[in-house]
Image: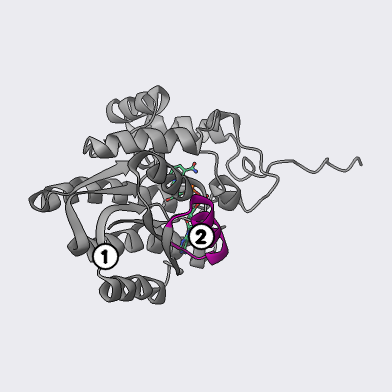
Amino acid sequence: MSVAIITGASSGIGREFARQMKEGLGVTEFWFIARREDKMRELAEELSVDATVISADLATSEGIEAVRAALSEKKPSVKYLINAAGFGKFGSFDQIDESAVSGMIDVNAKALVLITHMTIPYMERGGRIVQLGSGSCFTPLPYFNVYSSSKVFVLHYTKSLNHEIKKYGLRATCLCPGWVETEFLGAATDRPDVTVPKAMKPLLTKEYVVKKCLVAMKRGRTMCVINWYTRLQHLLFKILPDSILTKTWLGMLKHPEDSFKGVQEPKEEK
Ligand SMILES: NC(=O)c1ccc[n+]([C@@H]2O[C@H](COP(=O)([O-])OP(=O)(O)OC[C@H]3O[C@@H](n4cnc5c(N)ncnc54)[C@H](OP(=O)(O)O)[C@@H]3O)[C@@H](O)[C@H]2O)c1
């Protein structure tokens, strides 16, 4: 039986991949990987699928080794690998905890690479890999610095990897959506009351993003840039200099340190 392995299956885009892969591709055997075991078990029950649930913190080597151990023990025949685990933190370099800074690099880039490399030997010819990049991988983004840089890495890695895995009949697609309505933005600001800046709206739905990505994945596309708005952004990012793009981004943020604070406390009258 062919297996689909999904990291970040406990929430958002990863979870939606599981739903649509069951519906559209008839996948009935999954491996779900993330930290929140209860959410993954709930998903397996909701979809009525066979699921191997691996509760692992992918920012740690213990988490990575747990995945490696499960692969070598079960030797699955893997048709799909979806690397959706990831997170971002807004803020200036001196506001973000060092553990979050290294965590973004470890989960978004390092874990994605290691899990890809350890899974490829178990993949069937015709297998497909989806790597979660982001619309933010096209240009430098101050105050989203480390996150966007980790996603640049994912895009370049995916493009290069495709040349190396061709001989095994495999293809990888880097999914580069704009802002999607998931737990991501709340976690990025650590504020449950966050107000998303106007420039980020409208948010894409995870249903739409995953539907588009599965089409791109089946066609073996290297990149999946979701809608006309993100496509236009991608084109502008290609033709305009970084200085203009960065200025535009900073303009959208207006006051970068304050932009993601959501509901503001009224100022005390003197
Ligand atoms: N939402 C957006 O606007 C947007 C746009 C472009 C790209 N993306 C990318 O899409 C991917 C999925 O994000 P999402 O929007 O679906 O956000 P989400 O709802 O917050 O989901 C993030 C997933 O990553 C997992 N994860 C985070 N840190 C982890 C860790 N240390 N170890 C293991 N798993 C971890 C989370 O699981 P646990 O918390 O249970 O560990 C969760 O399942 C990310 O790579 C993100 O960068 C999101």
User: x, y percentage for residue 133?
Assistant: 36, 45
Give the quadrant of the C terminus.
Answer: top right
Report the predominant secondary structure element of the magenta stretch.
Answer: helix
Amino acid residing under circle 1: Pro
On screen, residue 102 versus residue 38, left or right, reads left
Q: Residue at the spot x=50%, y=62% of the render?
A: 100
Residue position for label 1: 76
**Residue projecting furthest to the left:** 167
Residue 84 lies, with reference to residue 115, above or below; the image says above
Q: Say which label, 1 or 2, has the lower sequence index.
A: 2
Q: Residue at the spot x=57%, y=48% of the render?
A: 183
Q: Residue at the spot x=52%, y=52% of the render?
A: 11
Is residue 246 something that shows in the picture? no
User: x, y percentage for residue 16?
Assistant: 47, 45
Element type at mark 1: loop
User: x, y percentage for residue 75?
Assistant: 25, 69
Span of residues in magenta = 33-49
Is 56 included in the stretch rendered in magenta?
no
Residue position for label 2: 40
Residue 8 in which image quadrant: bottom left
Residue 116 lies, with reference to residue 213, above or below; the image says below
**Residue projecting furthest to the right:** 270
Element type at mark 2: helix
